[in-house]
Image (cartoon, grey):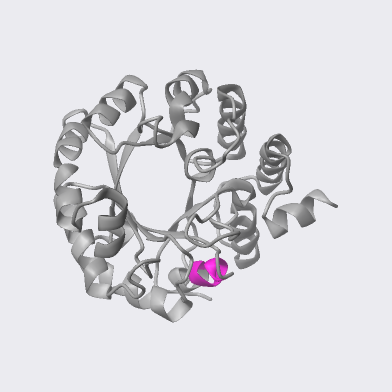
Amino acid sequence: MNNLPSQVKLVEVGPRDGLQNEAATISADIKIALVNQLSAAGFVNIEAAAFVSPKWVPQMATSTEVMAGITRRPGVIYSALTPNRQGFEAALAAAADEVVIFGSASEAFSQKNINCSIAESIARFAEVAAAAKANKLRLRGSISCAFGCPYQGDVSVEAVADVVQRLRDLGCDEIDIADTIGVGTARQVQTVMQRVMQEFPLTGISGHFHDTYGQALANIYASLEVGIHIFHSSVAGLGGCPYAKGATGNVATEDVLFLMQGLGIETGIDLDKVVAAGQFISTHLGRKPVSRAGNALAAL
């Protein structure tokens, strides 16, 4: 217990990663209200937008409107996903504080999704990375399928370390190690995290866990034990996993906050306000939040 971090940073990804796969169109006004509620709850980093082709991700077509409409709190980083130079320019114009680039630790996933190798996919981001640095924007790299792939199965620890090296060399300030399909287990997570710490400063490594197999909280605790203190979560557990039918996606922010509260770890986030935000967005989606802690607290 004494070795756990005393404080963690939670990156709220619900407005982007959580909502992007929703079939029903969510208006910009609702997204703006959600981001504002999350800002008011105390998050210091919110993934608010994605500047991607509306043809492929129609839900994110309102990103410019959302970024223009939110009430920005001083000190809060509002992040945007930028897959190419065009997306970067849009994020820059929208005054994003951080741009996010991404690669996969799985060759099969990279080929299936974007028809190129891991090395080619990350080389494509060199221009975005250079532009981010030139414009003094924070640059975050995200590594999908770091603990398993829907196409090739196992992903080696060295494959993850290799992508960390590539993103580090592009100048990333923070790197997310993501369990895209939620198959990671606690011991495996510690092995991967300890390996990537050899390639990138611990202070910039984050855990992005999905709860497909119910292991996300265990994996977060396992990460805490080896010193990781940045985690991604999604209010109300927003976000399905497209590779596991009917499965939940991102770990619910309310559940992570309840865990941290129980461990005496400071987050700076008001759990009650997050529960309210989860109820708000779930009402608009016409379903209950996935968060167990959120639903239990809302019922009190």
Q: Could you say which quadrant of the image residue 176 lies in?
A: bottom left
157 in relation to 163, above or below: below
Residue 68 appears anywhere in the view: yes
Report x, y in % for residue 173: 26, 47
The residue that appears at 31% across and 72% down in the rendered structure is 155
Report x, y in % for residue 186: 47, 77
115 in relation to 201, above or below: above
Report x, y in % for residue 32: 56, 26
**Which region is colored magenta?**
215-220
Tag count in the figure? 0
**The one of 113 and 71 positioned closer to us in this rendering:** 113
**The one of 260 and 153 positioned closer to us in this rendering:** 153
Q: Would you say 264 lies left or right of 11 here?
A: right
| Residue lying at the far right of the rendered structure | 300
Residue 106 appears anywhere in the view: no
Instruction: Kindly report the secondary structure that dominates the magenta region of the rendered protein.
Output: helix
Report x, y in % for residue 228: 40, 64
The residue that appears at 34% across and 65% down in the rendered structure is 146
Q: Would you say 11 lies left or right of 281 here?
A: left
